[in-house]
Image (spheres, rainbow, N blue to C red):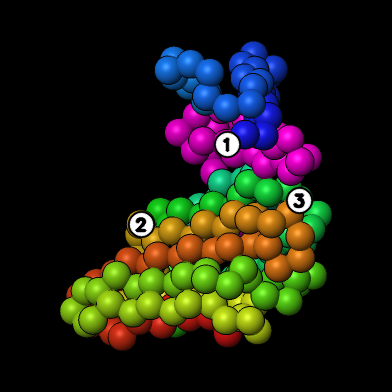
Amino acid sequence: MPAIEITDAKGLVQVTGTGVTSASAVTVSGATTVTHADGLKGSKTLQSVANVAPTLISATALSVNTYYKSIAASTAMTIPSAAASNIGDFISVYYVTAIGNGNAHTYTTTTDTAFALGSTATRIGGGVASKGDLSVAADNVLTITGHTNGDGGMGTTVRLVNVTGATNGWAIEAITTNQGSGAQAGTIAFS
């Protein structure tokens, strides 16, 4: 097996080896960087230990390794280049405020031409059937349009993870919950 090294942000935990050498568990919390023997690196911060207040989303480029919370107004966010960050970098948005009726939230890659293939957009049912969309080669925009009795309810989540560290490496998983009666058909979709 290749060598693996795990170090937390403060350098307090280091595990180096060529495979499993012990049955002992290693628990790491906070920001971590994982380096594989072939030089690939990734990082992950656990939301429960990030110890920072989420930032409000706005019509700007979202920052990597940042947690955001929603707003009710329409807004168009952009996603930074996947090649300018590392494997495992993330952007996470949690909707504590429902999207206003008719307001659209868009997430657009600007340097990259698409989200990673297999990215998902799901509307959890309500008064209507659930809806799902898978990204295809040309999809670089995710849109969620709020509706008083439809998409964009509290609890909606949008998570991006850099899966390649290269162009078009942002995988996105978006799950929208309904608000009101949920009778409006789902609007979440890639384009």
- Residue where numbered disc 1 is placed: 45
* Relative side of 68 to 98, left or right: right
| Residue at x-position 32% and y-position 66% | 177
Mark 3, other Cα within 10 Å: few <14 / some 14–19 / many ≥20: some
- List x then y, in percent, for residue 156: 39, 61
Q: Earlier in the sequence, mark 3 or mark 2?
A: 3
Q: Amino acid at mark 2?
A: Gly
Viewer-proximal residue among 135 and 142: 135
Q: Is residue 16 above or below residue 160?
A: above
Mark 1, other Cα within 10 Å: few <14 / some 14–19 / many ≥20: many
Q: How far is mark 1 from mark 3, CA to CA?
A: 14 Å
Mark 2, other Cα within 10 Å: few <14 / some 14–19 / many ≥20: some
- Residue where numbered disc 2 is placed: 155
Magenta highlight on residue 49: yes
Viewer-proximal residue among 5 and 134: 5
How many labels sit on residues?
3
Residue 147 seen in render: no
* Relative side of 32 to 153, left or right: right
